């Protein structure tokens, strides 16, 4: 999601270890499995989801999902890729933190039928918090397309700050798109308020 080059304040990369399973108030965030391919293809086959992501082609089908899952489940892509699932193990999205260049980058998406329920805020906060515990002192980079202010609000609620602006290529849109670059420094992380 982010084309920004990290500055010298970024700590050297440390392996966060295997992708854990996290449980939030409403979600289970677990490592992906090959059987998630159909759900991923249905979600990313929706142009309203794909258009907000930089690297997702249109059309997106089950074979695309299977190829991505093969990379993720074999550890070819350094980092974590969580399946966002509801309590009954329905796959509704993804949150990943992967090494790109020499910095960690957060990316995520959610099936359109689960938008506006606060699920992604819950998931991003849980993943970011656990990652910062595993790799202390590390910044997490991310970003959003300028026309995706809902996603920017998700990040800002977690503590991400705007770090710059630019353009990146969107495969789904087949165009350069204005992009807001963001960064979460460990001291800026905002954990969820305790439930009453």
Image (tube, rainbow, N blue to C red):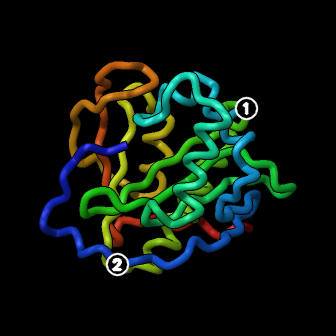
Residue extending furthest toward the top: 174
* Label 1 – label 2 distance at C-alpha: 36 Å
Residue at x-position 60% and y-position 50%: 94
Residue at the image point whose x is 34% and y is 78% from the top = 14
Q: In the rendered view, would you say 105 is above or below 51?
A: below
On the image, the x and y values in percent for residue 49 come to: 57, 30
Q: Position of residue 176 (x, y in %)?
A: 29, 23
Residue 77 in the image: state x and y as whole percent: 45, 60
Q: Nearer the viewer, residue 86 or 188?
A: 86
In the rendered structure, find residue 83 and report the number of the disc placed on it: none
- The label on residue 113 is 1
User: Residue lying furthest right in this view?
Assistant: 88
Query: Left or right of 11: which side holds 36?
Result: right
Tag 1's secondary structure?
A: helix
In the depicted view, which residue is nearer to us: 165 or 56? Answer: 56
Q: Earlier in the sequence, mark 1 or mark 2?
A: 2
Q: Quadrant of residue 43?
A: top right
Q: Secondary structure at mark 2?
A: loop
Q: Residue at position x 32%, y 72% from top?
A: 138
User: Height in image: 171 above or below 86?
Assistant: above
Question: Residue visible at 62% across and 56% down?
Answer: 122
Q: Position of residue 168 (x, y in %)?
A: 28, 32
Instruction: Please name the residue that numbered disc 2 is placed on.
Output: 14
Task: Mark 2: give few (<14), some (14-19) or many (20+) Cα within 10 Å.
Answer: few
Frontmost residue, 156 versus 113: 113
């Amino acid at each position: 999601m982010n084309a920004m080059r990290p500055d010298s304040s970024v700590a050297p990369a440390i392996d966060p270890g295997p992708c854990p399973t996290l449980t939030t108030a409403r979600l289970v965030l677990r490592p992906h499995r090959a059987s998630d391919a159909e759900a991923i293809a249905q979600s990313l086959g929706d142009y309203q989801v794909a258009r907000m992501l930089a690297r997702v082609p249109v059309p997106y089908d089950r074979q695309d999902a299977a190829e991505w899952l093969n990379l993720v489940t074999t550890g070819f892509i350094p980092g974590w890729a969580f399946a966002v699932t509801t309590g009954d193990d329905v796959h509704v999205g993804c949150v990943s933190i992967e090494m790109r260049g020499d910095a960690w980058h957060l990316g995520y998406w959610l099936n359109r039928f689960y938008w506006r329920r606060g699920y992604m805020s819950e998931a991003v906060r849980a993943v970011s918090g656990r990652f910062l515990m595993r790799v202390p002192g590390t910044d997490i980079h991310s970003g959003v397309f300028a026309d995706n202010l809902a996603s920017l609000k998700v990040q800002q609620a977690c503590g991400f700050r705007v770090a710059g602006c630019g353009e990146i290529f969107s495969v789904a849109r087949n165009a350069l798109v204005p992009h807001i670059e963001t960064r979460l420094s460990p001291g800026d992380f905002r954990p969820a308020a305790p439930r009453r």
